[in-house]
Image (cartoon, rainbow, N blue to C red):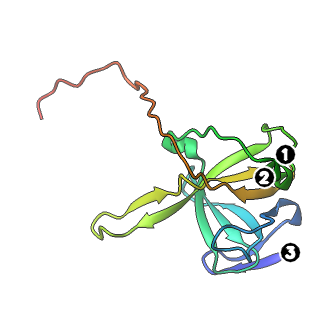
């Protein structure tokens, strides 16, 4: 199957790699079929291209790249939609990234951490899990035992 993407141009998509969001993504409910593309030059960012609208494209990444670890429970309805059947081994979590251009000198990338995407890699079904009440905790990891005492 061939698609056209406003950003990626013409692409050939294997129908067996299409991810379906049965209810779409909030704000994009009419976009139900998506395809992952890897962003060249980045080991972190992927493109999630809508196959229903060539102008809808999300930058997404694994939250672990940003030291974000999720712990939440899916509702029975969400498990049924994902066809997860209580098995979380096939589920991946991604966060949608967006560029914050308020500071034009140094734009930053932010992630929608309160609404991760949950995708069943086996059934290729996905949802966006909106987390209403979030408790945050911080994990500090030592990366080096060396202390730089050189003068600045």
Answer with the quarter of the image where residue 117 lies. bottom right
Q: Secondary structure at mark 3?
A: loop
Of 9 and 87, the residue lying toward us: 87
Q: Secondary structure at mark 2?
A: helix
Image position, residue 47 (x, y; %): 63, 63
Whether pointer 2 and pointer 1 mark residues with C-beta atoms closer than 8 Å, the reply is yes
Residue 23 falls in which quadrant of the image? Answer: bottom right
Q: CA distance from mark 1 to mark 3?
A: 27 Å
Q: Nearer the viewer, mark 1 or mark 3?
A: 1
Expressed as whole percent of the image width and height from the top left, the position of residue 144 reads 37, 23
Q: Which mark is residue 84?
A: 1
Q: Earlier in the sequence, mark 1 or mark 3?
A: 3
The residue pinned by badge 2 equals 78
Count all numbered tags in the image, as a single digit.
Answer: 3
The answer for how far apart the CA atoms under marks 2 and 1 are is 8 Å
Q: Where does the image place residue 14, in percent across and percent down from the top left?
A: 85, 65
Alpha carbons under labels 3 and 2: distance apart? 29 Å
Q: Is residue 123 left or right of residue 115?
A: right
Whichever of callouts 2 and 1 sits on the residue coming sooner in the sequence is: 2
Q: Earlier in the sequence, mark 3 or mark 2?
A: 3
């Amino acid at each position: 199957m061939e698609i056209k993407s406003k950003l990626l141009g013409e692409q050939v998509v294997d129908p067996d790699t299409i991810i379906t969001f049965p209810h779409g993504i909030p704000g994009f409910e009419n976009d139900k079929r998506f395809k992952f593309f890897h962003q060249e030059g980045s080991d972190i960012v992927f493109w999630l291209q809508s196959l229903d609208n060539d102008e809808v494209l999300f930058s997404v990444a694994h939250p672990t790249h940003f030291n974000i670890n999720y712990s939440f429970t899916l509702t029975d309805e969400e498990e049924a939609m994902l066809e997860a059947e209580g098995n979380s081994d096939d589920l991946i979590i991604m966060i949608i990234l967006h560029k914050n251009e308020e500071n034009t000198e140094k734009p930053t990338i932010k992630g929608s951490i309160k609404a991760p995407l949950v995708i069943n890699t086996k059934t290729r079904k996905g949802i966006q899990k909106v987390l209403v009440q979030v408790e945050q905790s911080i994990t500090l990891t030592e990366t080096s035992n060396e202390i730089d005492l050189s003068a600045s």
